[in-house]
Amino acid sequence: MQTEAEAQLRRLLDIMEALRDPQTGCPWDQAQDFASIAPYTIEEAYEVADAILAKDFAALPDELGDLLLQVVYHARMAEEEGRFAFADVARAISDKMVRRHPHVFGEEAAREAGMHMLAWEEQKRAERAARAETGTLAGIPAALPALTRALKLTARAGRVGFDWPDAPAVLEKLAEEVAELRAELPEADPARLADEMGDVLFVVANLARKLNLDPESCLRQANAKFSRRFGEIETALATQGRTPSEASLEEMEALWMEAKQRERARS
């Protein structure tokens, strides 16, 4: 008997097939290809992350649905070209999860405590080898957000011993990189400044890793905090019939500190 989940997934697959139908489908959907849809796929993943960050669980099913649509969309286009179908996508991830969890799906001996992470890493190495990907850093997507990729690159290098010993050591490296950036300020050469700024950000990502933090999540929280506090500045100025461009920096700094103090009082 078909479950509700199976029925709704089948419905979504049928809807996508109808949208892409060459005769009766939607002209916009018919015109899309993998490259044109890829940016939407990334955007929808971020919207899922935003809903989770905001703890907006009422919106999360809708956002997850948008992300699922992206998977269905890519699978449908691939099926039209005779490359693969949605079933192949689902089979591939199911097979991978079983392979990577022998402590759950394998022999009883593999279920010993502590074996799961070792099995996961061994399976990932085997999968990279099967794809002819060589080298410690192989398989880390270049299209990842830069901070996330820095996190993954250094975590992978750390597994083979190329790593700072602890967070204080990374802080020392950060101070060194900031000093190198400061030294470039008088010349203001764009290429050198960009290089040094990149080094600073790379070390910051490493520091987050050493503190068991996700730098992307940390920066998203900081962005949200900045937006919230700046919004309060605008609201306060609006009650005076003014905009930020009509206020001095000192006035806005004072309003910023007031917003900061209100947040601390609420927390």
Image (cartoon, helix red, strand yellow):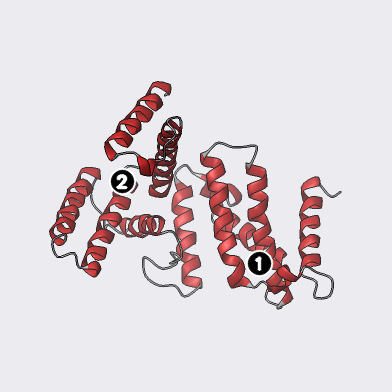
> Of 86 and 70, which appears nearest the observer?
70
Other-residue count near label 2 (Cα within 10 Å), few / some / many at <14 / 14–19 / ≥20: many
Going by the image, does 255 lie left or right of 28?
left
Asked whether residue 13 appears in the rendered view, the answer is yes
Name the quadrant containing residue 141.
bottom left
Q: Which residue lies furthest to the bottom in this view?
A: 81
Q: Where is residue 83 in the image (x, y as percent from the top left)?
A: 67, 76
- Residue furthest to the top in view is 265
Q: Where is residue 34 in the image (x, y as percent from the top left)?
A: 61, 71
Of residues 225 and 198, the one drawn nearer to the viewer in this rendering:
225
The crowding category of the residue bearing disc 1, from other C-alpha atoms within 10 Å (few below 14, some 14 to 19, many at least 20), is: many
Disc 1/disc 2 C-alpha distance (Å): 36 Å
Residue 90 in view here: no
Instruction: Please determine whether, in this image, residue 174 is positioned above or below residue 86.
Output: above
Q: Mark 2 points at which residue?
A: 210
| Residue pictured at 75% horizontal, 71% vertical | 27
* Residue closer to the observer: 157 or 145: 145
Residue behind mark 1: 74
Q: Which of marks 1 and 2 is nearer the N terminus?
A: 1
Q: In which quarter of the image is the C terminus?
A: top left
For this orientation, the residue located farthest to the right is 1
Image quarter of residue 84: bottom right
**Element on which disc 1 rests:** helix
Q: Residue furthest front?
A: 241
**Which amino acid lies under the numbered mark 1 shown in the image of this protein?**
His
Residue 226 on image: x %, y %: 39, 40
* Residue at figure coordinates x 81%, y 66% from the top left: 18
Q: Which amino acid type is shown beneath numbered disc 2?
A: Lys
Q: Which mark is residue 193?
A: none
Q: Please identify the quarter of the rendering in which residue 29 is found.
A: bottom right
Which residue: 17% across, 49% down?
175
